[in-house]
Image (spheres, rainbow, N blue to C red):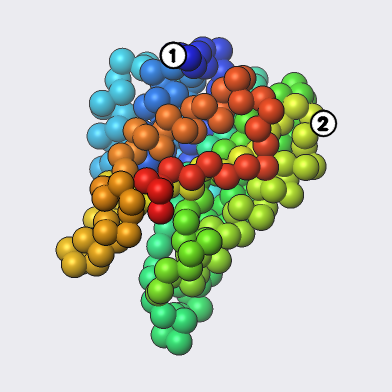
Amino acid sequence: MITHDFSQQTVIVTGGTRGIGRAIAEAFLEAGARVHATYAGNETAATAFAAAQAQAGERLQLHRFDIGSYSEVEAFYQALDRQGERLEVLVNNAGIRHDGVVGMLSPDDWQKVIGTNLTGTYNMSKFAVLAMMRTRYGRIITITSPSGKLGFEGQANYAASKAGQVAFSRSLSKEVARRGITVNCVSPGFIETDFIADLPAEQAQAYRNLVPLKRFGKPEEVASAVLFLASREAAYISGATLEVTGGL
């Protein structure tokens, strides 16, 4: 079994203090990486995560800002640059949902979802590319969703943002290939996190019945896929989407 070693590597995980993002950040910490986990505003989750990972010491840094804000993202990267840190891995994990059928979907809910999920991916990836080009090495992994392909009812904004992430990643992978940077997506299906905890029990069971494996996935199963794509062993994989969906 391959055990990935990320010691001496710096990793950014957006939305990295809870749910899938937390599992990804924890997996990188376990593999020896220095992790910068970002979050938008849930201080309770961030505090709990920091406490649980106290043994990581200075290898874990938390940062609160809005990835949908170009200026805030730029300031974050400028701070890293002043610290003299190299960047090896970016995981675009942060995402939000504001569901509603299109006829009733407010412009604000449309913009919020596109702004965080898609524009946030652009903001974080742009500055990551500039940092990675200096060393001619990097891994960018974006957490997308089957919704971008299947288009679940009531999630037009979310589906559009996720389909956009895949298209964005494919284009970016071609732009940076000669610089030793790979760009891929991981597409989790229904995963046991707070992200789907607000679903009515009947709807959750209906979604579970759609999955050939007849269960929801675990955040750790997504993290394993991310670590593989972020590893040096995955050097010939780029522009791809790895589905972690239980066969959905």
* Residue 71: image location, x then y, percent: 62, 50
Q: Residues within 10 Å of mark 2 (few under 14, many from 20)?
A: few
Residue 185 falls in image quadrant: top right
* Residue 150: image location, x then y, percent: 48, 64
Residue at disc 2, secondary structure: helix
* Residue 5: image location, x then y, percent: 50, 13
Decide if residue 162 is on the left or right side of residue 1: right
Q: Which amino acid is tagged 2?
A: Arg
Residue at the limit of the structure toward the left, as seen here: 201
Residue drawn at x 27%, y 59% as measured from the top left: 209
Q: Out of 25 and 168, give the one closest to the viewer.
A: 168
Q: Which residue is mark 2?
A: 178
Residue drawn at x 41%, y 53% as measured from the top left: 248
Q: Which mark is residue 228?
A: none
Q: Which residue is mark 1?
A: 1
Decide if residue 231 is on the left or right side of residue 207: right
Q: Nearer the viewer, mark 2 or mark 1?
A: 1
Residue at the limit of the structure toward the bottom, as seen here: 103
Residue 236 appears anywhere in the view: yes
Give the vertical position of 128 relative to 42 (above or below).
Answer: above
Q: Out of 119 and 46, give the one closest to the viewer.
A: 119
Question: Sequence order check: which comes first, mark 2 or mark 1?
Answer: 1
